Image: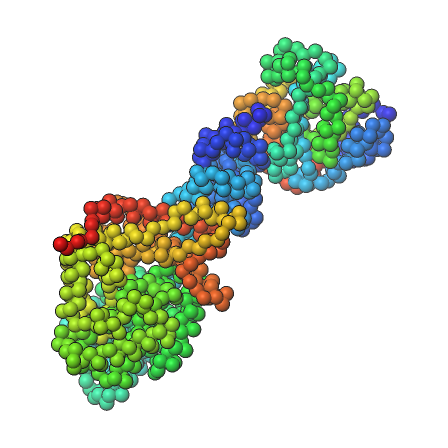
Amino acid sequence: MEVELIEIRDHMRQFAPFDELPEDALNDIAGHVEIAYFRAGSQILAFGEPIQDLYYVRSGAVEIYRRTGELYNRLEEGGIFGQFGLLQDKSVRFPAKAIEDTLIYCLPEPLFRKLWSNHESFADFVEVEDRSRLRAAMTQAQGDNRMMTAKVRTLITRPPVTAPSIVSIREAAELMTEQGVSSLVLTDPAEDGGLRGENRQRPDYSIVQGIITDRDLRTRVLATGLSPDTPVHEIMSAELFVCEADDFIFEAMLTMLRHNVHHLPVLHKHKPVGVIGLSDIIRHESQSSLFLVSNIHRKHDVRSLKALSADVKATFVRMVNEDANSHMVGSAMAGIGRSFTQRLLELGEEQLGPPPVPYCFLALGSMARDEQLIVTDQDNAMILDDRFDPQAHDAYFLALAKFVSDGLAACGYTYCTGDIMATNTRWRQPLSVWKGYFTDWIEKPRAEALLHSNIFFDLDGIYGETSLTTSLKELIASKASKNARFLAHMARNALNRTPPLGFFRTFVLEEDGQHRKTINLKRRGTAPLSDLIRVHALAVGSRAANSFERLNDVAATQLLPDGVANNLKDALEFISIVRIRHQAQAIEAGKEPSNNIDPEQLSAFERRNLKDAFQILSNAQKFLRHRYGTAAVRPIHNP
Amino acid sequence: MPQTRPIKDTSRWPDRMAWLADHSQDPRLRDFYRAGCRPPETPISQVPMVALDFETTGLDPSQHGIVSMGLVPFSYHRIRLPQARHWVLKPRLPLEEESVTIHGITHSDIASAPDLNLVIDDLLQQLAGRLVVVHYRAIERPFLDGALLSRIGEGIEFPVIDTMDLEARLHRQKPPGFMDRLLGRKPVSIRLSAARERLGLPAYKAHNALIDAIATAELLQAQLQHRFSANTPVGKLWR
């Protein structure tokens, strides 16, 4: 071997990932490098230009930037860069600049590819170089979407028009006309310093009590013939939804979606600083999923609801193309699903008459978690008031359940194959029976039974008497965290599905023409993640259903080591978004979206970050096994 | 056949090469000259180059011989290491003890090495169409000229960029005279490394003809970026 090659080889072998390469691979590299010099201050790589080499810093120092110009990394002797571009589409992802006089060894792409294929340590290094990278990828993606970064305060155009809630409807309407607004924020007269006094001009000192809108005046006054002299608080919305000035716009949008309201008072330090309307958000995001929701609520039969199901796909694709994150997409899709369900229940009640006893319609699983996607079946149930008498009332509720279930199926939400639907007698029961179910599941846990009832621990009351659901949630939160055996069984079930860690090596082999495999991103990714997050959430007594919110609750405790909750969020977000994007691509290509991914469709960027995410999941499963002692759990065999 | 001497007016290098292509007797040299050189106004970034370094038994082409040759093709942007070449040769003139330690080439290496005759073809093909870059032009061009003259009865001429000359232009008011060269002769390699160090280039531990050729190519890239530009006409640089 030539002495000049030894010089190069011996330099590179001091630094990762070259330090773990065998001698012959190092010799191969040394025989192929090209050299380039860059003066301090000169640009080495510009964003988007083609890249054909991996860059190795032989001497000097280099700074790597994000596309936005923000500093990403600083490299010294032995550092490498350019791997992102090589792995992705052979164009520069991260611009690089010499900050000292720098000598670079360039490893040509075919050599890089060969090292990547043949040496796992090398592949790991260039792919999983930095644990924070997954987060960087997520932050980057979100940064492109204004909905994700802009605050509600940027939508406020004027201070809110307010009035004490004891003014008459007529006075309220006059004020709204005079000020040219479509909503009026009503304040608590006790806090408003005697209403008509000087404090009238100082809404800062008032506490928001409610809101009325043009629509309320129309539907609650004119349509009902109510006297205009009635105090306005009698018609104001009893349940008030608000947002904070520092909330992100998408959060305000989710609140509107979730509760089907079109105006949100904006608070800052508990004081009203403005009102934002549906139109403000739609102006901001021209093709909002809110459109669809309000459309759903305007339809009058199943047939016209069914006609909207094409819009669901279109909305989904639009959100994906606008770089919405998985939380936004999942919440929007769940909001749309809830709206279909709610509207069907309203239509059902119109047909069948009012319910004989109060009830609450439950969403379960992904809809309850606000993690619904486009490929989804319906999981629902009904909690009935304890006055329920099967003989007298069940025919009504069965008919209603069937109407909703058939309607949902018509709108694209296929029937649940596990028969977890309100049409199943077992899942259409009074509260006392439901309490018995949950008590049984938690206090006498059996792995098999829990496997099928997992989904009931993600529940959300979406229509009717929602307090019925609240009492069930209280019961779960109070019992589950205290029952180690129950948690151990849940944990064991959460380990049934494992991430495809060996998948990426296989993928390389598949390039050589071996038989093709697909990967189910739900079964091997998001589902086991939400399973294990659910166990932790139950253990800490969280009442949240959404996985991200559950992780917030878990992170507030000492249950998980530092940083783990955030890693899990990143992993869930990334796997979800890959799943979402591939579904959107399938829809755009006119294909049937699915949870199965053909590995050849994955970009190198996705592969790399998926690998990180699966590793996080795998580590979290190991922790779960250890934390809840699942090894000790045996199925109960009654003598 | 005229004797070869470096020409005075360096802007005339293309003409000189063309004339030599028509008048050279040796077919290998004719091919070399036909490949020619770029017009003097060509921006340096568009000129293919080759860094060349010889290890010799001494500094006088008339007395000493070539022990090894290294070359590496390069451009303003890239040094093409995979295309680098290195030959150990058997010099006609005796190898002096002092040189042995300097070069790390032993008598047994030399004993089994070919004569330059056998690699002329190969060498000229590597140089053809590329502008030769050396550090200290009093070595490679005169030694090659002398070696060819004694073997095929005809010397060789070509323009070179001398990275030491470029250093001298900056660090001395006038070009180095013969005495300067003479004084500077022993620490030639030191000069190369000193110039490299000034421009932020790493020191190489080992030395041979190819490493020094690579070092020279790197030095020129650094000099061009620091003191000239991609658009500097090649005629301002060559000698």
The image quadrant of residue B194 is top right
- Tell me residue B147's x, y (percent): 76, 20
- Tell me residue A96's x, y (percent): 50, 43
Residue at point 26%, 82% (across, down): A349
Relative depth, front residue between A269 and A14: A14
Looking at the image, can residue A152 be seen?
A: no
| Direction from residue B164 to residue A544 in the image, left or right | left
Residue at point 49%, 41% (across, down): A116
Q: Is residue A39 above or below residue A369?
A: above
Q: Is residue A101 above or below residue A580?
A: above
Residue at point 29%, 51% (across, down): A495
Looking at the image, can residue A473 be seen?
A: yes
Residue sitting farthest toward the top: B97
The image quadrant of residue A111 is top right
Q: Quadrant of the N terminus of chain B?
A: top right
Relative depth, front residue between A389 and A362: A389
Q: Quadrant of the C terminus of chain B?
A: top right
User: How many numbered discs?
Assistant: 0
The image quadrant of residue A288 is bottom left
- Tell me residue A311's x, y (percent): 42, 73
